[in-house]
Amino acid sequence: MDDQKPIPVEWARRVCNILREGDKNKIAWTLRALQEWQAATLSVFSYEPQDAMADALSLPGVIGVKVNLSEDGETYAFFFTFQKRIFYGKICLRSNQLNIKIISAHIPRHGTKDLS
């Protein structure tokens, strides 16, 4: 997909910090994202996907796609791995730069070549 580009370093840094901190008051999940994560992995621990997403976003030059949603903030979609499997993630960094919303965390539905 043509709009895949390196995710802005500052966005990734802020999101990684929030994910690694793990403060439940700063991290919201959509019900669907949580259910799809649990169905795909049988994991009930929120730190596992959060750590996996932070690991991916901390890589230099991590690629993603900016997604325009009706969320209050800036959202990027990207791939990450957990237990040697590829997952599709989508996170919104809220406008206050202090909170995030995990919108997607599931097995890619359209393959791993693009983030559509």
Image (cartoon, rainbow, N blue to C red):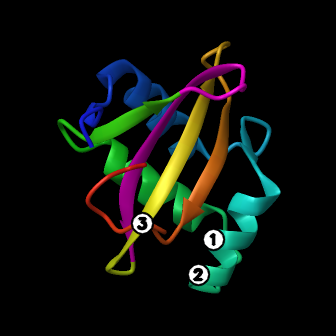
Residue occupying image coordinates x 60% and y 62%: 47
111 sits to left or right of 40? left
Q: Which residue is mark 3?
A: 110
What amino acid does circle 1 point to? Trp
What amino acid does circle 2 point to? Ala
- Neighbour tally class for label 2: few under 14, some 14-19, many 20 plus, Cα within 10 Å: few
Residue occupying image coordinates x 32% and y 80%: 84
Let me know if residue 74 is in the magenta part: yes
CA–CA distance in space, label 3 to label 2 = 16 Å
Instruction: Residue at the far bottom: name it.
Output: 42
Figure quadrant of residue 82:
bottom left
Q: Nearer the viewer, residue 52 or 40?
A: 40
- Neighbour tally class for label 1: few under 14, some 14-19, many 20 plus, Cα within 10 Å: many
Q: Nearer the viewer, mark 3 or mark 2?
A: 3
Q: What secondary structure is marked by label 2?
A: helix
CA–CA distance in space, label 3 to label 1 = 17 Å
22 sits to left or right of 66? right
Figure quadrant of residue 23:
top right
Disc 1 + disc 2, Cβ < 8 Å: yes
CA–CA distance in space, label 1 to label 2 = 5 Å
The magenta segment: 68-82
- Neighbour tally class for label 3: few under 14, some 14-19, many 20 plus, Cα within 10 Å: few
Q: Which residue is mark 2?
A: 40
- Looking at the picture, how far across and down is residue 69, in whole percent? 64, 29
Residue occupying image coordinates x 31% and y 42%: 58
Q: What secondary structure is marked by label 3?
A: loop
Q: What secondary structure is marked by label 1?
A: helix
- Looking at the picture, how far across and down is residue 71, in whole percent? 71, 26
In this rendering, is residue 30 above or below 98? below
Q: Nearer the viewer, residue 115 or 15?
A: 115
Let me know if residue 96 is in the magenta part: no
81 sits to left or right of 100? left
